[in-house]
Image (cartoon, rainbow, N blue to C red):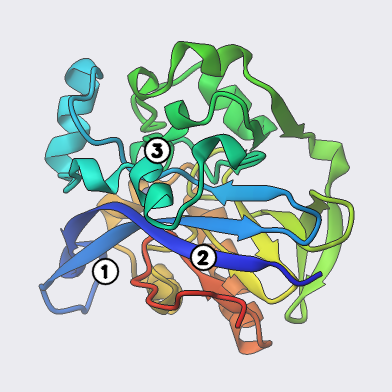
Amino acid sequence: MRGRLRHLVCGSTSHDIGALFRDTPHARRDFPSGVFLYDAADGSRILFDTGYAPGRWRTGWRGAVYRRLLPPRVVAADDVAARLADIAVEPASITHVVLSHLHPDHVGGVRRFPDATFVVTQGLERTLAEPTLRSGVLTGLLPDWFATCRRLVVAEGSWETSEVGGVPLRTRDLLGDGSYRIVDLPGHADGHLGALVEGRVLLAGDAAWGSDLLAKVPDMRALPRAVQHDAERYEETARLLAEAARGGIRVVCSHDPVVDEDLLV
Ligand SMILES: [Zn+2]
């Protein structure tokens, strides 16, 4: 298995890091919205998340509240379809879209992939069935066809435990050759997931605000803690990922400022 893993940025937001963590100086930090494209050896093309949606969001007052808390910076060139065009990839050639969770900075480009198989967990399905304000899901960002699109739902009973950098994590092999494993990373949202690519790079979604911030998770302030689906499991997931990173796994969070052209080189 020798595929290629590329990083695309589809919009960004910024936040005061001192408002997120105790004992941290106030400073605004940029959080790009990362999308990760894996070209598998068998010809599959897997996208991990889809970034922000440019243009008007038809998401009512919930959307207005969200945009006030985390103002997105997104222009037409940030659309995932435009980012893919930049690297000569047709959106229709994407075979799978893996969604780490359903927050607006991860699902904005879903509408570009009507023919893909969407890979989600049962927790994500639950959230979709009954989105609450606290779940942070803006269903207006999802196209009508999303309710009936082709989906692969990772069932609770189908996880297997794998050693990842010496750490036991629950995974599910997506392509049958071990090159792309969906990873259960609970805490941030119900059913929040990551992906382990070729056993080396772990796409960790929003398991932390950044991979450099995994160790700071226990210092998180009350408000950012309160918006996690399950703060205790979030903290435990961050601890395990920090340990996996020490064990040689490259952990990449969705909002990391990744600069590499190919993450597997
Ligand atoms: Zn996010």
Image coords of residue 36 (percent x, y): 51, 57
The reply to whether residue 127 is in sight is yes
Tag 3: amino acid: His
Image coords of residue 138 (percent x, y): 35, 25
- Quadrant in which the C terminus appears: bottom right
| Of marks 1 and 2, the one in the foreground | 2
Q: Earlier in the sequence, mark 3 or mark 2?
A: 2
Image coords of residue 54 (percent x, y): 23, 36
Tag 2: amino acid: Arg
| Of marks 1 and 3, the one in the foreground | 3
Q: What element does badge 2 sit on?
A: strand
Q: Is residue 233 left or right of residue 51?
A: right
- Quadrant in which the N terminus appears: bottom right
- Name the residue that disc number 3 marks: 103
Q: Alpha carbon of mark 1 to alpha carbon of mark 2: how far?
A: 30 Å
Whether ligand 1 has any atom under 8 Å from the Cβ at mark 3 is answered as: yes
Q: Residue at x 44, y 78 (%)?
A: 260
Q: Which of the 4 image quarters holds residue 201?
A: bottom right
